[in-house]
Image: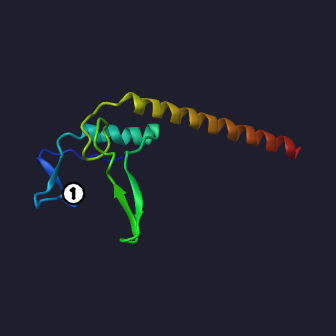
Amino acid sequence: AIALQGDFGGVAAGAFAGDGSPWLLDAAGAHRHVLAALLALLAGLQAPQSARFSAARGRTVPSYLWTIGAHPFGPWSNSSEVSQTLLDAAARNSLVCAHHAILRHLAAAVDEVRAR
């Protein structure tokens, strides 16, 4: 994960400019982006955006419908705190990973017994 922090005000997000003036993302407050990267890498959490296929464009286009809110993901989020919902999802992801590891070990043990 890479997060850049600068003292140059804001970074223009050209794809989101609407009325001719660019949407500026805060370059000085990198802590929210670092937190989002750590949540994605360590807890398996992802930004609440999705992609949908656009027949008119012939490709997938991102949907930013759920990117506003109290979470550290995305350019429109407004919080550096982790909500209880995200904590629950992180706990669920760790349980799913542990369950998957146990199943892999059991399958390896069964294969070893069958080979004898």
Give the colouring mode of the picture.
Answer: rainbow
Residue found at the very far right of the displayed protein:
116
> Relative to residue 6, is residue 82 depicted above or below?
above
Q: Position of residue 28 (x, y in %)?
A: 17, 42
Q: Amino acid at mark 1?
A: Phe
Q: Secondary structure at mark 1?
A: helix
Residue that appears at 28% across and 46% down: 3
Q: How many C-alpha atoms fall within 10 Å of the one at disc 1: few (<14), some, or many (≥20)? A: few
User: Which one is in front, 86 or 58?
Assistant: 58
What is the count of numbered marks?
1
Residue that appears at 37% across and 45% down: 47
Q: Is residue 67 left or right of residue 104?
A: left
Q: Is residue 35 left or right of residue 18?
A: right
Q: Position of residue 21 (x, y in %)?
A: 10, 58
> Relative to residue 67, is residue 96 depicted above or below?
above
Residue found at the very far top of the displayed protein:
84
Q: Position of residue 70 (x, y in %)?
A: 29, 35
**Residue under label 1:** 16
Q: Position of residue 79 (x, y in %)?
A: 26, 34
User: Which one is in front, 18 or 91?
Assistant: 18
Classify the position of the C terminus by image quarter. Answer: top right
Residue that appears at 57% across and 37% down: 97
Q: Is residue 42 left or right of residue 104?
A: left
Residue 38 in which image quadrant: top left
Q: Is residue 95 left or right of residue 42?
A: right
